Amino acid sequence: MGKIKYEKDSNERLQRCRSVGHDPDFSSCTSKEEKIAQAIELIKQEKVAEAVAIYQELEDVQDTILLNRLGDVYADGKGIEQDSVKALTFYDKSANLGNPYAMVEIGLAYEYAKGGYKKDTKEAFKWIKKSANQGNELANRWLRSVWID
């Protein structure tokens, strides 16, 4: 399972929502899945504030792609004020739902004491190993370079 799979899932969701008769800009989206697809598309278009507004109106978002992307935009400060604590909040939700890329971010937060996380090498290893076990090659390379060499 790799980043390509997550991109594919996102694109398939987007196509499903568009295929049910909604206009391409999602102005008439109503279901939670459609709203999530709209938010993901807005992030791709670098309309981050609009995506965050959609996220905030949804309850109990369990979509790992959207949560991870929101983590990315807060981490990078791309289209929104950079905020590592908010980024890690989104990564944490996504990681706990099984997203291997978010797991790496949480592992690195523990390893480097980022965003309010206390340094904890064992916890870092646990998260990055969990990601590697899901086939994340970046996590595998990191494990080999840091803990095996």
Image (spheres, rainbow, N blue to C red):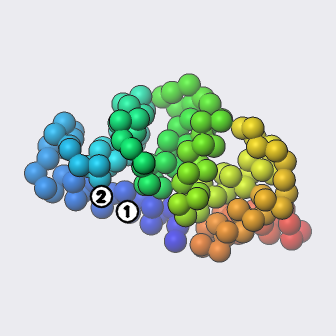
Q: In this view, does 63 lie to the left or right of 35?
A: right
Q: What element carries label 1?
A: helix
- The quadrant holding residue 134 is bottom right
Q: Residue furthest right?
A: 149
Q: Is mark 2 on a helix, strand or loop?
A: helix
Q: Residue furthest top?
A: 81
Identity of the residue drawn at 82% across and 44% down: 118
Looking at the picture, which amino acid does disc 1 mark? Asp
Checking the image for residue 9, the label placed there is: 1
Identify whether 89 is placed above or below 148: above
Q: Is residue 45 something one can see in this rendering?
A: no
Along the line of sight, which residue is nearer the eye, 27 or 41? 27
* Residue at image mark 2: 13
| Residue 22 image position (x, y, % from top left) | 14, 47
Q: In this view, does 34 lie to the left or right of 104?
A: left
Looking at the picture, which amino acid does disc 2 mark? Arg
Identify whether 118 is placed above or below 135: above
